[in-house]
Each structure stands twice: as structure tokens, then as C-alpha cells.
Amino acid sequence: MSYYQALDLSKEPFSTSPDPDFFYHSREHTTALKRLEIAVRLRRGLSIVLGDVGAGKTTLSRALLQSFNGEEDHYIFHMILDPDFKSEYQFLAHLTKMFGVSPFLRSSMDHRETIERYLFQKGVDEGKTIVLLIDEAQKLSMPFIEILRTLLNYETNEYKLLQLIILGQMELLPRIKKVKNFMDRVALKYIINPLDENETAEMIRFRLGRAGANGKKEIFTFEAIRKIYEVTQGYPRKVTLLCHNALERVVMDGRETVTAELVHALVEEEKRWRT
């Protein structure tokens, strides 16, 4: 019997990949998503979303992209998943290549001018909205943050030509505060907090439902969900990983449900790996 058959599911419910179809719309994430969409549609410029590791920022970004499905004629999204560049020139060269305007340019100034022409052509001449989304933004060094500040200078009388969305861990905040006039340009500031206990339970049930569970039987007991929340403190990535490990153990041991005792045993095993 396969993994899915044993659980009466059709998909993996607790993959850690940022699949927007499994994006649980908690109060925090729904607010962040709606505000980001408004900021992009109004072409407000700079949006910053911060949160601790595993808070759901990457999945949020995929959900944002999904909300613009079918509007490719008006919106052009570009993503940088790992902004760990070695030099200012490399960063700018990556941007021009990503924008599809990458001739052989010798200097950072040439790249800046090329990016400016691209933004005016797409944003003014063609009437498109250009969105640059940077994930793991805590890896941005000060010179790169300064480059982004400069790109935000490109605007018309009505709107910013580049919609910049920065997603990063909390450690980014004191760094961007040091960049002169950067925080003044932020149209949207949002910090994602973890789920509460009820939302943790709802997220687990939501993902099981997305994976094909019919709801006729509880795969996780009430006590198991409470234990999962106690251990993970509502961080979606931790919840997802622990739930996957629990289901894997259920299948391997021929059990029917995830109990609090099973969750406790998994947590103790993990502790042994960390000590």
C-alpha cells in the first residue's frame, strides 16, 4: 500500500515547498497578502515584509504571484531568491540580465542607465507595472540596499516605475534603518507573526483537505495538535515539518492517527540529533 493510500490522501499535505495552493490564509498572512496586492496595483513603490525563519514569507510571495495570474499583459514580475552577490557590478548585471536587457556593459553606471531606460520603456511607454520581489533579503549588504534606494528614484508624477517587495528576516530591520532616506520611502511595512493555537489547528486541517482528506476521520487528535503548537509555537515551516514526520511514522507503524505521545516521541528524537 502506498503512502497516499495508507492515509487516504491524493497529495503530499505537508511539503515544505512554497506551493500557493497549500497557502493557509491566516489573519496575519491574509492581511499581508491583501496589502501587498494593493501596494502593487497602486504602484506605491517599496513594500517590506519581515518575519522570523519559517514564518511563511516565501509561500506568501508565491501566493502574491498567483493573485496576478491572467494579468501578464499588465504586470511583469521578477524574483531574486538569493540576493547574495559579491559586488555592486554583479548585482546590477544580474538585474539587467533578469530584465532581459543585458548587453555587454563595462561599468555599474552603464547598468544603472540601462535599467532606468528599461523601467521608463515598460512603465511609461508600454504602461506595464514592473515588480521586483527579493526573498531572503537579510542577505542584502549595505551597498545593495543603497542601489535599491536609487532605483526607487525612477518615477513619474503619479507613480513609482519599480514596485519593490522585500521579504526578509527581522535582522534586516536595523540595517535598512541605517540607509539614509530608505525607510521614508517604504509604502508598506509589515511584520508576520506566527499562528496562534486555533490557526495552527486550522492550518493542519486545511492542508489535509487540500491533499484529499474527506474529514470523516481525524488524522491528528486534538491533543496531538495542541502538542504540535506547543513545540512549534505556530511557525508554519516547523508545523509542516513536524506534521510530515508524524504522518510518515503513522504509515511506517501501521497506525491510524497521530497522537500527542507520537508527537512527543518525534520531538525527543529530534533533540537527540541536536545534542
Image (cartoon, helix red, strand yellow):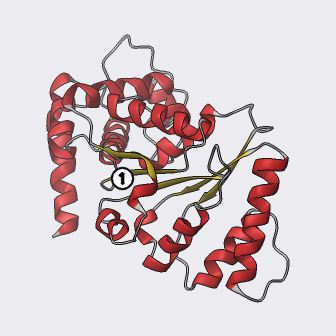
Check disc 1 and give the amino acid type: Leu
* Residue 55 in view here: yes
Image coordinates for residue 65, horizontal then vertical, percent: 61, 40
Please tell me which residue lies in front, 208 or 101: 101
- The residue located at (30%, 54%) in the rendering is 52
Quarter holding the C terminus? bottom left
Q: Is residue 60 left or right of residue 102?
A: left
Image coordinates for residue 95, horizontal then vertical, percent: 68, 69
Q: Is residue 131 left or right of residue 104?
A: left
* Residue 1 in view here: no
Q: Quadrant of residue 249?
A: top left
Image coordinates for residue 51, horizontal then vertical, percent: 33, 51
Number of residues whose C-alpha sits closer than 10 Å to that of mark 1, classed few (under 14), some (14–19) or many (20 or more): many
> Relative to 255, is 188 above or below?
below
| Tag 1 secondary structure | strand
What residue would you read off at disc 1? 50
- The residue located at (55%, 85%) in the rendering is 86
Please tell me which residue lies in front, 155 or 200: 155
Image coordinates for residue 9, horizontal then vertical, percent: 49, 26
Q: Is residue 56 left or right of residue 123?
A: left
Q: Residue furthest bottom?
A: 106
Q: How many marks?
A: 1
Please tell me which residue lies in front, 44 or 254: 44
Q: Quadrant of residue 89?
A: bottom right
Q: Is residue 89 left or right of residue 208?
A: right
> Relative to 23, is 62 above or below?
below
> Relative to 21, is 58 above or below?
below
- The residue located at (38%, 36%) in the rendering is 251
- The residue located at (50%, 37%) in the rendering is 12
> Relative to 99, is 256 above or below?
above
Q: Residue furthest front?
A: 157
